[in-house]
Amino acid sequence: MTLRLNTDFAAGLFGLLFAAVLWFPREGMGRLSIIFPRAILVIMVALSLALIVKAFTKPAAREVAIEGSPRRLVIMIVVLFAWWYAIDLLGFLVATAIVFFGLVWFLARIEGAVSARRLAQWVPIVALLIGVFYLAFTEVLSVRLPTGIWS
């Protein structure tokens, strides 16, 4: 499907909506912990507003080709927002394991049926990926990840 779209306006609007959703802090964030995320959001709002102004002063409509299934795209977006919400409830490790295995199965299913053997082959890869993310956040960046049901 090909759409004729003012990409500056679309990106600016998406940036504003995204910043609005993330503006309200999650429970438990300290006053000092929120400074950096808020600074990034203020920069995002400024850039989004600049894109919207540019969209009206110098409109540049482009043809955007959307390949693949729009249904799959919507499902992926919903799953990622559900993951974001589930991290608080279940904890980072549990929620990420469930979502990553679900996404691997969902995306591989496009090519055909996924056997239990093939799914089992992905266990070490997904576990390694989750472990690298976990160690990067906890050890390198010193970020406390939600523990959810394990706390």
Image (tube, rainbow, N blue to C red):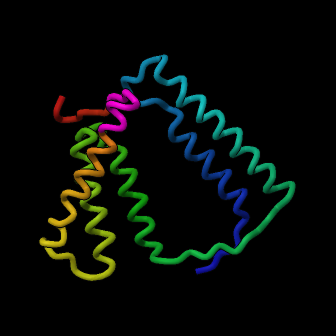
> Hey, which residue is sitting farthest top in the picture?
31
Q: Which residues are magenta?
A: 135-144
Q: Is residue 67 above or below residue 103?
A: below
> x and y percent of residue 86 in the render?
29, 44
Q: Is residue 18 above or below residue 88?
A: below
Magenta stretch, main secondary structure class? helix
Q: Is residue 66 above or below residue 139?
A: below
Q: Is 95 left or right of 47, judged from the image as shown?
A: left
The quadrant of the image that shows the N terminus is bottom right
Q: Is 80 left or right of 58, judged from the image as shown?
A: left
> x and y percent of residue 45 in the render?
66, 39
Residue appearing at x 58%, y 47% in the figure: 17
> x and y percent of residue 103 in the render?
31, 62
Q: Is residue 137 magenta?
A: yes
> x and y percent of residue 132 in the render?
31, 45
The quadrant of the image that shows the C terminus is top left
Nearer-the-camera pick, 18 or 146: 146
Q: Is residue 54 magenta?
A: no
Residue appearing at x 35%, y 57% in the figure: 79
Tally the marks.
0
Residue appearing at x 86%, y 54% in the figure: 57
Residue 133 lies in quadrant: top left
Residue 60 lies in quadrant: bottom right
Q: Is 35 left or right of 83, judged from the image as shown?
A: right
Residue 36 lies in quadrant: top right
Nearer-the-camera pick, 100 or 78: 100
Q: Is residue 105 above or below residue 95?
A: below
Residue appearing at x 19%, y 59% in the figure: 123
